[in-house]
Image (tube, rainbow, N blue to C red):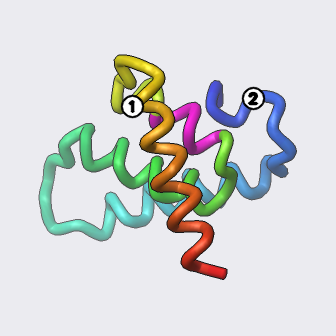
Amino acid sequence: MQAIHKRPIPISDVDKLIDDVENEIMGREEKEIDSSVIGELVMEKLRDLDDVAYVRFASVYREFKDVDTFLREIEKLAKKKGSSK
């Protein structure tokens, strides 16, 4: 919720993201799912939903240590967005 705070994201989109992550987890064969898998799923879904929310979540989840790490992540995001157009 912190990642999407003050972002123009409808609550229905947030609910769908949560449902999608839950469905992916429930569809797995494993009885236990590592929290890192859940974090990666959330990041993947946020990346598609809102760039700013994704960067916010990733900066905390991946524990960005400095500005260079933060900038590299933004550059990767920009490249991915540019190649999908």
Q: Is residue 57 magenta?
A: yes
Q: Is residue 5 left or right of residue 82?
A: right
Q: Quadrant of the C terminus?
A: bottom right
- Tag 2, which secondary structure? loop
User: In the image, residue 82 lies at what x, y percent?
Assistant: 61, 71
Identified by mark 1, the residue type is: Thr
Q: Residue at horizontal 39%, vertical 31%?
A: 69
Tell me the tag on residue 5.
2
* Residue 10 location (% of width, % of height): 84, 51
The N terminus: image quadrant: top right
Residue range highlighted in magenta: 53-58
Q: Main secondary structure of the magenta part?
A: helix
Left or right of 3 in this view: 68: left
At a point 70% along the width and 36% down the height, the residue shown is 4
Q: Which numbered disc covers residue 12?
A: none
Q: Earlier in the sequence, mark 1 or mark 2?
A: 2
Q: Nearer the viewer, residue 1 or 6?
A: 6
What residue sits 45% from the left and 43% below the top? 73
- Magenta stretch containing residue 56, yes or no? yes
Q: Is residue 69 above or below residue 19?
A: above
The quadrant holding residue 23 is bottom left
Residue that numbered label 1 is attached to? 69
